[in-house]
Amino acid sequence: MDQPKVHRYLSQSRLAEDPAAAPSPISENYQRTFAELKERLAFDPADSPELFVAYTPEARVETLEIDGDCSIVYDQRLGQSFNRLNDFALADWPQPYVIQWGLKHLAVALAGCGDSDAAGAALMCSQVWPVKDRPTTRSKEIFPVRMIVTAIQEHFVLAHECVHAAIERGLPTADRAEFVANLDAVAAFLDEQTGNPDEAERQMIQDEARAVQAMSGAQGTPDPQLEERLRSARAQETRDGGRAAGEILAGKLDLREELLCDQIASELVLAKFAAMKLDFATILTSILHAFHNLTSLSVIRSLARDWREDGPPSPELQALTVRKGVWRTNMRATEEALGLDREAHSGFVEITELHASTVGDPILFILPFEFHRIMEKLDGESFDKTGVYEALHALGTQPPGLPSTEA
Ligand SMILES: [Zn+2]
């Protein structure tokens, strides 16, 4: 596809004014990875997708079919967001940094919904949000690990998009009738798990206690009203997860291709990084961490959409919940098939706990709470729309080189 079409699409659909204005200094690295993936998936060179490396505030990767041509847009800002969120979790950053980061991304999402006053408020507050005690030393210590984790996650999302294009072309690597047939059994298993009230209840109480704890760390004493809000938010989430898995079973939600892409993309990532002498548990744990990061980004987009009134959970968030659950179940089977003794299992539990306590809970519970407080305080104050959009556009103008550390 000729690039102007992709540029036009991006400038119409995102905050990026001119996506071609600042080419990424590490664009070649992505092109190399992409060429490798295309080879592994056995694309016909005459009919294969092109990669367009973008850098937009939205941090969104997508596959475009325009006039019969296929382009994959890889947004470097997504990798940058992974990098930042990995650092927050692995170096255990203080919560105010996570909220500051969340407000900035919320501003972008609100602007995308056309809510410029709320976007202005979120952006302004992210700029003046009180932060202190940056864990610089710890952050430096874990830098080499974080680079690998981020590289695995970027590879995974790019591979996932490539598999979509391969499926579209009916390539042999994408032919997994057995996998698709097996999804019913996986969904039934998940449904049973999330539908079990005792297990769901136990999990909910545990999560709720952790969220209240996180909140009391931020605010002093927990507020009883807030505890109630947390309880109902978590209960809703648990029910949504169960229902979404049930819907796959009933064939109502067309998620099968997503699940297949996750599976094949994981195999591609395993092949690539195992050849670099990384162990399977590390690779799989990093992929699960990517799912958790994607969930937090999706929670922010949902908040932007629904903050004025509660709506049903966004389909994107529901889909991610199911993808994560099915992926975990399938990876257990993959491990068994490879003769590994649940090596990744403890890594999964650990990263899930770590992400929830450092990033997941603050974004899910504290960001909405703080944002509502901000909007109540501002009480209908309006912002200069042009100024807000200019400031947000500026977020998408300087793609980082290696290593990318700020977002
Ligand atoms: Zn997909």
Image (cartoon, rainbow, N blue to C red):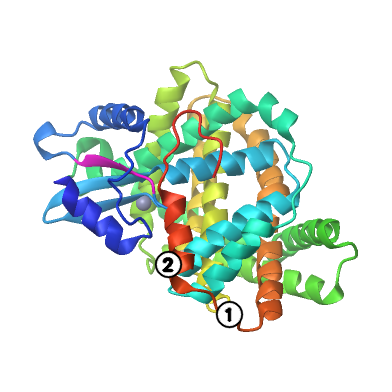
According to the image, label 1 marks what residue?
310
| Quarter containing the C terminus | top right
Q: Which quadrant of the view contains residue 299?
A: bottom right
Please give left or right for residue 272 compared with residue 345 in the image.
left
- The reply to whether residue 318 is visible in this rendering is no
Neighbourhood count class around disc 2 (C-alpha, 10 Å): few under 14, some 14–19, many 20 upward: some
Q: Marks 2/1: CA distance?
A: 18 Å
Secondary element type, mark 2: helix
The structure residue drawn at horizontal position 60% and vertical position 39%, both measured from the top left corner, is: 86
Is the residue at mark 2 in contact range of ligand 1, meaning its CB lies under 8 Å from it? no
Vertical side of 5 occupied by 114: above or below? below
Q: Position of residue 346 (x, y in %)?
A: 68, 35
Numbered badge on residue 112: 2
Q: Position of residue 365 (x, y in %)?
A: 69, 64
Q: Looking at this view, name the residue that lies furthest to the right.
A: 221
Q: Quadrant of residue 8?
A: bottom left
* Residue at the spot 51% in from the left edge and 51% down from the top edge: 294
Percent coordinates x, y for residue 232 in the rendering: 71, 74
Does residue 47 appear to the left or right of 205 in the view shown?
left
Residue 29 shown left or right of residue 273 in the figure: left
Q: Of circles 2 and 1, which is in front?
A: 2
Tell me, yes or no, if residue 135 can be seen here.
yes
Along the line of sight, which residue is nearer the eye, 291 or 32? 32
Earlier sequence position, callout 2 versus callout 1:
2
Which quadrant of the figure has residue 24? top left
Amino acid type assigned to the residue bearing label 2 in the image: Gly
